[in-house]
Image (tube, coloured by chain):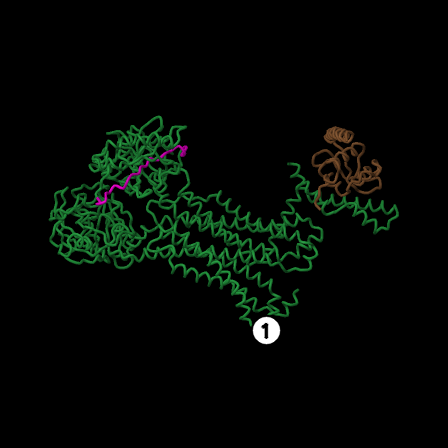
């Protein structure tokens, strides 16, 4: 090998000497022949004839030193670049669209990998199993909740056939499910949401995770510094310790080592930092990124009596669990062993026959990629996006194919010339292939750049949407290689076919008839039809998602979206006592209301759009007379809440300062609630009875209907507003109705809060509009991406149309010339070309409309108030596509109309 | 076009052997080798002359022969090749192989 390299380095000298040797050989041969009586000229010819093809022999010899391949490659690439330059516009567009296709594919796949496929950054994630359960729906036909699950903190999601699925369990399950024959370790964890995290007098609000003592050991993670939480830390009366994320150690302590042993205040409770998680570790759910890991039992310390009540309750479901399977135990074996075990345990918790009738059943799922929250939410959209970018790549590949086909046809003459001059057939084929691969590689390189840029853009796009959501997407080189490989393959395929055909051609006809061949033309038309059909599908998809977004935006919320600043405080976590919480919040509210430029200020336990996610204000059943209110939501709100939110008041009064803690309890109900339970009677002055807390709420007002807890929810939710002072929530979200841009007031607000209590971080500062958009961030992101991709697809397809038509015009120049010589009008020529494109487009539409309508049934669940076969969207997409195609064909058509008959006819 | 020289020979690889054999007797330049092969075989062996040079390159790359610029008997500048010790070993190997092969062919032909 070394010798070969050496040979290659000396290749110029070697080539020279080889040539000299061969010359000498020919000369001596000629001399010998001459001495045998031949004329000098004959002798030279005969010498050459006997020698064989000097060029090829020369190349064969060079090939032996391997230089031939390399030098020819360089030649071919140079030649390829030159021919590409000769056809600048189309080559550039084809490469560009290919690059965009490759870039988009790589970006989306990288995103998908980070969200759906990447393994947890822990030891042997393959042997982790997540514990889930599923059961019959908990509600009976008359909406009574009958289930062993009496209370939850966590999530349910719909399973197959109307079942209920979840991954949360009561704490006692953990011990019940321990089985050393199946799990080497079994651990639990609980999303602790944001906590007040004070370091040296400065507090921030950071996401937390409560974990059992075996969590870190079970996951097999090594700390970046210090030690992890152990079972000893998770005992009653253990010293409170905390493990912090790597990023937090850097931001707050200046490095992992500095953090160890530091005292910190978590919700105003002293903890000691004992360890720092490694930088790549983010817990077990890719959607969450806890900055604090706390022993599970410290939740009793932080959340007090509420947590104490549910901690050991065998009917309160809250703890998520994961186990590490013993080596050699499969998930199926574990399922077979643990299923009955769970059944037996859970049946002891049933309190009635009704509950026993629909006990939850255990389901073990692979834990390799962590929990499924993000996956469930994003899997479908991501597959749709992946399908889209796949189609875009196909359209781009069709462009490359088109380019190569057109070029091969145009170069038949050139190839024939080269063959007749003695070029080896393989040599010509290889040269053509090099050109196609060159195109594809250029696309690949640019594609990589686009992908890097795209991932950055996507990270921003997604980061803006979700709270505490960090997109950990990295450029996936495998994907890049696959897409680039695909494009090269495409280049090879479409480069090879014409190359073979061109070189097979008899030399003479090739030289004589430069232009011809209808078959290739058909392939090109086919490609254009395919391109248009594919871009139509993408256009329709984008249209549907944009429509969905529009529908979401035009939803009647029942409250104001604009000019409201929202921010959240949790004074309880900062150390305020229950008794003074209400006055503290009320005082602050008065200060906010007095900011110049703030029209009115109020507070509630959360924003309306995210209401319900932080619990209801009223923890009791509600009764009017003897009727229990079903499906009623409650929200604790401050004075002037309806006015601040601009919720119309239909009767009675708004909440006010006078509804303080000592005043008689009151409530405002929505119109729908009033209609449902009071009919046409006037509800003002009537009472809602709370039997569990032995209170009566007097109804003082009726508000218009509104959407509670989201914007896809029912239009008229049954909502009860109660005074925040009387049902004090721990955290409150203030709402300031402002003049002009609400965010202008953010600094003033921060200042007021800092003056009131420096330990109290202001979180989630954003406008009401942004808060609302956050609940539809998936749809928002999705619509933006789809629109982008649709544009890309449209442009790519237009490049195809343009290229094909340009080629057609060039090929038919003489025909067009004849037509014009015979008196055809310019418009007629333009129309002739346009008509061709429009026919192709029409064929494409005829194919793709039924496909789109049928295929889009799978995305129905992603749409809102629109149907996969929405005629308006289909029509719009069709019109856009036809116009784009006509536009793309117009330039070549115009060129056709300017053909000078004399020049065109002389060309052949 | 593009055929390898070996494919043209009745016995694969025999050109290499013939060249090595020729060079084991004396140092020669390319044309000299062709001439020698033709003369010593009474013009029975017709080497495709052009194929000689790729073969020479291959043998040199394998380290079996060495080429150096010199002057021919007719006083012209030429690359003169000589066999190396490794080349002699290779020649021995090929000769044995050739002997076995021809013997085998002879047997077959004899029985036929």
- Colour brown maps to chain: B
Task: Give the vertical position of A846 relative to A305 (above or below).
Answer: below
Residue A473 location (% of width, % of height): 42, 44
Quarter assignment of residue A210: top left
Secondary structure, mark 1, is: loop
Chain letter matching colour green? A
Describe residue A876's horizontal placement relative to residue A68 as left or right.
left
Where A640 sits versus A322, above or below? below
The percent position of residue A363, horizontal first and vertical second, equals 33, 35
Quick one: A450 or B40, which is closer to the camera?
B40
Label 1 neighbourhood size at 10 Å, few (<14), some (14-19), many (20+)?
Answer: few
The boundaries of the magenta stretch are A123-143
Within the image, what quadrant is residue A357 found in? Answer: top left
* Residue A141 in magenta stretch: yes
Q: Is residue A581 above or below residue A257?
A: below
Q: Chain of mark 1?
A: A
Q: Position of residue A522 (x, y in %)?
A: 56, 57
In this view, A248 is above or below A43: above
Residue placed at 32% from the left, 46% from the top? Answer: A467
Is A119 positioned to the left or the right of A142 in the image? right
Identify the residue under disc 1: A823
In the rendered image, the residue lying farthest to the front is B112
Q: Residue furthest bottom?
A: A823
């Amino acid at each position: 090998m070394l010798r070969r390299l050496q040979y290659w380095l000396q290749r110029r000298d070697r080539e020279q000497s080889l040539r000299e040797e061969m010359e000498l050989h020919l000369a001596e041969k000629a001399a010998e022949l001459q001495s045998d009586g031949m004329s000098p000229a004959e002798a030279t010819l005969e010498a050459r004839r006997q020698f064989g093809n000097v060029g090829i022999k020369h190349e064969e010899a060079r090939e032996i030193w391997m230089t031939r391949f390399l030098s020819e490659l360089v030649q071919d690439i140079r030649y390829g670049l030159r021919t590409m330059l000769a056809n600048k516009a189309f080559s550039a567009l084809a490469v560009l669209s290919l690059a965009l296709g490759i870039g988009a594919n790589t970006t989306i796949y990288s995103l998908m990998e980070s969200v759906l496929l990447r393994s947890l950054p822990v030891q042997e994630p393959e042997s982790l199993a997540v514990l889930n359960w599923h059961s019959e729906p908990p509600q009976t036909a008359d909406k009574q909740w009958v289930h062993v699950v009496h209370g939850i903190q966590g999530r349910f999601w719909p399973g197959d056939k109307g079942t209920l699925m979840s991954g949360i369990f009561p704490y006692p399950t953990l011990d019940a499910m321990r089985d050393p024959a199946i799990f080497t370790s079994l651990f639990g964890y609980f999303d602790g949401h944001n906590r007040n995290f004070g370091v040296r007098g400065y507090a921030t609000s950071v996401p937390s995770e409560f974990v059992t003592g075996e969590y870190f050991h079970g996951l097999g993670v090594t700390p970046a510094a210090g030690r992890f939480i152990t079972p000893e830390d998770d005992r009653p009366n253990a010293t409170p310790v905390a493990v912090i994320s790597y990023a937090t150690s850097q931001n707050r302590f200046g490095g992992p080592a500095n953090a160890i042993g530091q005292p910190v205040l978590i919700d105003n409770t002293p903890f000691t930092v004992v360890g720092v998680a490694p930088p790549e570790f983010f817990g077990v759910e890719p959607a969450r990124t806890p900055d604090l890991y706390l022993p599970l039992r410290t939740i009793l310390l932080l959340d007090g009596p509420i947590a104490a009540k549910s901690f050991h309750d065998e009917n309160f479901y809250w703890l998520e669990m994961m186990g590490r399977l013993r080596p050699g135990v499969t998930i199926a074996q574990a399922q077979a062993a643990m299923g009955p075990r769970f059944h037996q345990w859970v049946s002891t918790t049933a309190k009635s026959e009704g509950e026993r009738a629909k006990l939850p059943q255990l389901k073990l799922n692979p834990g390799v990629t962590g929990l499924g929250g993000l996956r469930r939410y994003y899997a479908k959209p991501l597959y749709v996006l992946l399908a889209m970018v796949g189609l875009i790549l196909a359209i781009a590949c069709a462009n490359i194919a088109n380019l190569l086909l057109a070029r091969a046809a145009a170069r038949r003459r050139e190839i024939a010339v080269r063959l007749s001059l003695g070029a080896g057939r393989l040599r010509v084929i290889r040269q053509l292939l090099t050109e196609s691969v060159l195109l594809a590689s250029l696309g690949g390189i640019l594609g990589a750049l686009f992908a890097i840029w795209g991932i950055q853009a996507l990270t921003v796009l997604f980061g803006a949407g979700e709270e505490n959501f960090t997109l950990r997407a990295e450029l996936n080189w495998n994907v890049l290689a696959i897409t680039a490989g695909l494009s090269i393959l495409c280049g090879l395929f479409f480069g090879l076919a014409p190359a073979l055909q061109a070189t097979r051609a008899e030399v003479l006809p090739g030289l004589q008839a430069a232009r011809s061949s209808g078959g290739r033309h058909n392939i090109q038309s086919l490609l254009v039809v395919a391109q248009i059909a594919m871009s139509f599908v993408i256009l329709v998809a984008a249209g549907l998602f944009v429509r969905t977004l529009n529908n979401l935006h035009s939803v009647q919320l029942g409250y104001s979206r604009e000019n409201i600043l929202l921010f959240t405080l949790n004074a309880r976590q900062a150390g305020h006592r229950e008794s003074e919480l209400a006055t503290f919040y009320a005082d602050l509210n008065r200060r906010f209301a007095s900011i110049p430029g703030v029209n009115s200020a109020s507070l509630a336990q959360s924003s309306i759009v995210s209401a319900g996610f932080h619990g209801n204000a009223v923890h009791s059943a509600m009764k009017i007379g003897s009727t229990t209110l079903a499906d009623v939501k409650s929200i604790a709100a401050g004075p002037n809440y309806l006015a601040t939110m601009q919720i119309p008041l239909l009767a009675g009064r708004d909440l006010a300062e006078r509804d303080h803690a000592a005043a008689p309890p009151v409530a405002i109900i929505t119109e729908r609630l009033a209609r449902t339970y009071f009919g046409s009677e006037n509800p003002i002055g009537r009472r809602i009875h709370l039997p569990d807390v032995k209170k009566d709420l007097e109804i003082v007002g009726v508000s218009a209907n509104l959407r509670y807890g989201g914007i896809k929810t029912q239009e008229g939710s049954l909502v009860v507003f109660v005074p925040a002072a009387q049902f004090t929530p721990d955290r409150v979200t203030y709402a300031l109705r402002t003049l002009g841009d609400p965010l202008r007031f953010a600094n003033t607000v921060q200042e007021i809060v800092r003056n009131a209590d420096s330990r109290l971080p202001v979180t989630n500062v954003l406008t009401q509009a942004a808060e609302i958009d956050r609940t539809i961030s998936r749809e928002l992101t999705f619509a933006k991406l789809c629109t982008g991709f649709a544009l890309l697809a449209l442009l790519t397809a237009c490049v195809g149309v343009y290229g094909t038509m340009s080629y057609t015009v060039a090929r038919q120049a003489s025909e067009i010339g004849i037509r014009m010589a015979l008196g055809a009008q310019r418009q007629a020529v333009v129309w002739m070309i346009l008509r061709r494109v429009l026919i192709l487009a029409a064929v494409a539409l005829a194919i793709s409309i039924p496909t789109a309508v049928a295929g889009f049934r799978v995305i129905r669940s992603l749409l809102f108030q629109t149907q996969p076969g929405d005629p308006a969207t289909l029509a719009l997409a069709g019109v856009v596509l036809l116009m784009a195609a006509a536009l793309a064909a117009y330039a070549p058509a115009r060129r056709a109309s300017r053909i000078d008959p004399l020049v065109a006819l002389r060309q052949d | 076009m593009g055929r390898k020289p070996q494919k043209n020979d009745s016995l694969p690889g025999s050109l290499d052997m013939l060249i090595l054999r020729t060079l084991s007797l004396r140092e020669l330049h390319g044309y000299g080798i062709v001439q020698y092969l033709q003369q010593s075989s009474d013009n029975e062996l017709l080497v495709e002359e052009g194929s000689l040079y790729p073969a020479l390159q291959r043998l040199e790359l394998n380290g079996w022969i060495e080429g150096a610029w010199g002057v021919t008997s007719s006083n012209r500048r030429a690359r003169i090749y000589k066999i190396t010790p490794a080349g002699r070993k290779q020649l021995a190997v090929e000769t044995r192989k050739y002997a076995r092969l021809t013997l085998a062919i002879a047997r077959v032909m004899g029985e036929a």
